[in-house]
């Protein structure tokens, strides 16, 4: 999959102007690509450390400081078919030492399930939340999943996670019973 590059532009009567996110001191150049098994060892801890306690809670449904080994193994299992991922980088922050593709800023993934459709998740580090990274990754991840034969995804989202609920609703998601009043379950047909 070739990288996708985006830069947000806000057009008004004065002509094009770049949107500026208050926590980013440069113009981001977002590039996405399919995740590979080696990416987990290289980027996971850096990305996890860049999540606030609130973001970790929204992603894992509980306050977490460290993830248990079985969860880490499951997240590291990316084969591109049963479990797949798309990683977003800010290519404006490339460096030869640790970030040849840019700073890792998010991951969207599907994780296969033996009991039903694959599970969908999207994580964007705090500094880049609200900048369109989640939408870019969702677009790329849904295209990749469809190419790999995935036709339906399920996403369990905390009811209070309004940004994720807004994101997933852009993809004609259908709400389904979750069995838990704290969780909204979405079905995305692709």
Image (tube, rainbow, N blue to C red):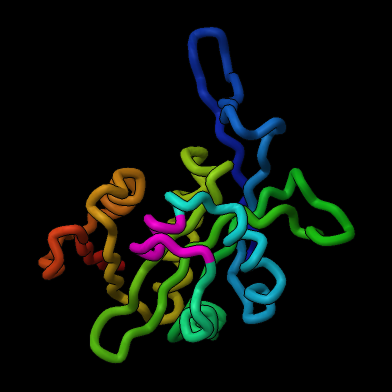
Instruction: State the residue lying farthest toward the right.
Output: 96
Instruction: Please tell me which residue is depicted at 34% across the width and 74% down the height of the picture.
Output: 119
Q: Position of residue 127 (x, y in %)?
A: 58, 42
The picture quadrant where one finds residue 37 is bottom right
The residues colored magenta run 56-65
Q: Is residue 2 above or below residue 102?
A: below
100 left or right of 124 in image: right
Instruction: Please tell me which residue is depicted at 71% across the width and 32% down the height of the picture.
Output: 26
Q: Position of residue 68 (x, y in %)?
A: 49, 79
Q: Is residue 103 above or below residue 162?
A: below
The picture quadrant where one finds residue 166 is top left
Instruction: State the residue lying farthest toward the bottom.
Output: 114
Q: How many marks?
A: 0
Residue 39 colored in magenta in the image: no
89 left or right of 59 in image: right
Q: Position of residue 144 (x, y in %)?
A: 48, 70
Answer whether residue 174 is visible to the viewer in this image: yes
Which of the image's four quarters has the N terminus? bottom right
Instruction: Please tell me which residue is depicted at 62% across the width and 68% down the height of the picture.
Output: 44
Which of the image's four quarters has the C terminus? bottom left
Q: Is residue 144 above or below residue 20?
A: below
Q: Is residue 9 above or below residue 55?
A: above
The picture quadrant where one finds residue 184 is bottom left
Residue 62 colored in magenta in the image: yes
Instruction: Please tell me which residue is depicted at 67% across the width and 66% down the height of the picture.
Output: 43
């Amino acid at each position: 999959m070739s990288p996708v590059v985006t830069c947000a532009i806000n057009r008004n009567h004065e002509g094009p102007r770049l949107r500026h996110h208050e926590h980013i001191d440069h113009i981001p150049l977002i590039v996405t690509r399919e995740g590979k098994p080696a990416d987990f060892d290289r980027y996971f801890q850096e990305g996890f450390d860049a999540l606030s306690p609130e973001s970790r809670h929204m992603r894992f449904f509980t306050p977490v400081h460290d993830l248990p080994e079985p969860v880490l193994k499951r997240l590291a299992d990316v084969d591109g078919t049963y479990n797949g991922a798309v990683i977003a980088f800010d290519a404006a922050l490339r460096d030869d030492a640790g970030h040849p593709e840019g700073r890792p800023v998010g991951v969207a993934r599907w994780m296969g399930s033996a009991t039903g459709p694959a599970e969908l998740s999207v994580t964007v580090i705090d500094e880049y939340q609200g900048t369109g990274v989640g939408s870019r990754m969702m677009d790329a991840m849904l295209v990749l999943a469809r190419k790999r034969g995935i036709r339906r995804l399920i996403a369990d989202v905390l009811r209070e996670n309004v940004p994720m609920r807004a994101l997933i609703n852009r993809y004609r998601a259908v709400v389904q019973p979750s069995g838990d009043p704290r969780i909204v379950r979405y079905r995305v047909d692709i």
